[in-house]
Amino acid sequence: MELTDIAIKFGLIIVIFLISLVVAMYSTYAERKIAAFFQDRMGPNRAGPGGMFQPLADGMKMFMKEEIIPTNATPFLFIVGPSLAILTACIGSAVIPWGQNFVIGDKIIPLQVTDINVGILYIFGVVSLGVYGVMIGGWASNNKYSLLGAIRAASQNISYEISMGLSIIALLLVTGTLSLGEIAQQQHGWHWNVIYQPVGFILFLVCAFAETNRTPFDLPECETELVGGYHTEYSSMKLGFYLFAEYINMFISSAVMATLYWGGYNYPGMDWVTAHVGPVIGPLIGTAVFFAKIFAFIFFFMWVRWTIPRFRYDQLMDLGWKILIPLAIANIVVTGIVITLLN
Amino acid sequence: MESLSNKKKQLTVKPLNFWERAYLPAIVSGLAITMKHFFKKPVTIAYPDVKREFSENYRGLHSLKRDENGAERCTACGLCALSCPAEAITMQAAERQKGEENLYREEKYAAVYEINMLRCIFCGLCEEACPKEAIYLDGDIVPSDYLRKDFIYGKDKLVEAPLNQ
């Protein structure tokens, strides 16, 4: 690999990292604002025009707060917990194709950090690792509520990962590849996978809500039962990292859903647009479309959060094991039969 | 058993049909309801910036009135303090000296007049008791403060501004 290629990759990684941090930062603001609108309120409007600087003020507050490590906690693991949570949240973005390839001169610049051929499995691995951050943090706090929250998070994530994996298998039958870059390319124009896999998409969506610990599946941090859940004992920026990781996870899972099911950077009439505006602006429009899809999903996450109350724990397990998994298996069988008949 | 009042109503719980059990239609209708609220105007009135319009007989902060010549009307008769159910009003009377006729209307005036705004219940009985039309609750909302002692309002805050200013 040449030096310029390395520099380009490095720049891309930095840009994606910054974008995911900024998006996560402003998701907190968006969430408060959207929550306010859903409840006929105004939301934060004091810091800057329309409250635009509220995330900065919140971040500042997080940094200035006293750092408390409880006496009975395990100090090393107590710090590792949130670090792991934010680390696993950030590395998920590596395999997501953010746009079409740029062609400048005879150089092709892919807008994807790395197109490994097991992209989906990589995402699954990273998502599974995310549980460790929660689990270690809850365990190291030496607090029964934290531990209960951590156990809930672990069992919930494991349960929903199964149906998530099964819903992906049906998608793989359609696409025939595990690489996210290829999956995005296959959905050229408006041949989006959601048309071929509507049930799979709904299953994946429900599981994504559960994996990111968002309402109605936010039992790990259920205030009414568990004080604060797994981050009861956390303060200062360590708490900030946990909250931040949740928003980055939301961003990444929105990106994954948009890539897998909603066509990624593809939109109807993209060939015509690219032919008219040239090979540099065209992919940029695609990237803008991709981000519009991501933001739509983030908005949907928040919309659901301010609509639906939390599940009871046994209902959560019922839904995961008795409904979603059979449904996912049925989806695989039906997809397999249809594909066999069509070929 | 037979109901005596005939008001007893037998209720039956219908088992949920398939669509109700499927849960997703219910979520969709819930999402539609919240989306309706999303586009509604917020009901908030951003108080210090925007003020809600008061009714005409709103009872707010007290003010001690002056007469048409700018002299204080209050004669420190103490009827307001006597009528006050919350015992929020205290005063000390003093005799008017020569040359103060333009300041005080009668021969007696209130040298100290204090209302404790934390005790006051804004009932308006002082206003009704006053024989000299000297006190009215025609002001604003009492502003917030940090210390209890700052809520005891003296004459400096209560008396109307002089006429010629």
Image: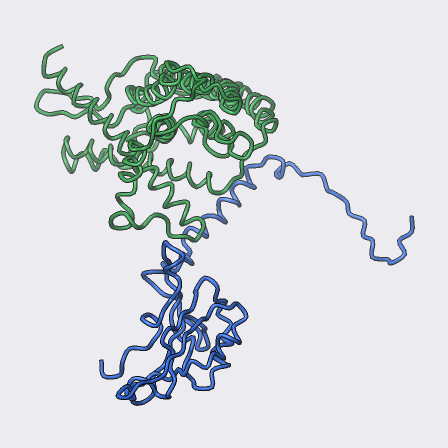
Which residue reaches farthest top? A1
Horizontally, residue A100 falls left or right of residue A199, namely left
In the rendered image, is residue A133 in sight? yes
| Image quadrant where residue A324 sits | top right
Which tint was used for chain A? green
Q: Where does the image place residue A107, in percent across and percent down from the top left?
A: 11, 20
In the rendered image, is residue A192 in sight? no
| Image quadrant where residue A301 sits | top left
- Which residue appears at 9% of the width and 13% of the height? A3
Q: Where does the image place residue B119, in percent across and percent down from the top left?
A: 48, 64
Chain shaded blue: B
Horizontally, residue A43 falls left or right of residue A283, namely right
Which of the pair A191/A62 is nearer the observer?
Answer: A62
Which residue reaches farthest right? B1
As drawn, A50 above or below A143: below
As drawn, B33 above or below B131: above
| Image quadrant where residue A325 sits | top right
Give the quadrant of the N terminus of chain A.
top left
Which of the pair A234/A197 is nearer the observer?
Answer: A234
Which of the pair B29/B134 is nearer the observer?
Answer: B134
Q: Where does the image place residue A14, in percent across and percent down from the top left?
A: 20, 24
- Which residue appears at 19% of the width and 34% of the height? A282
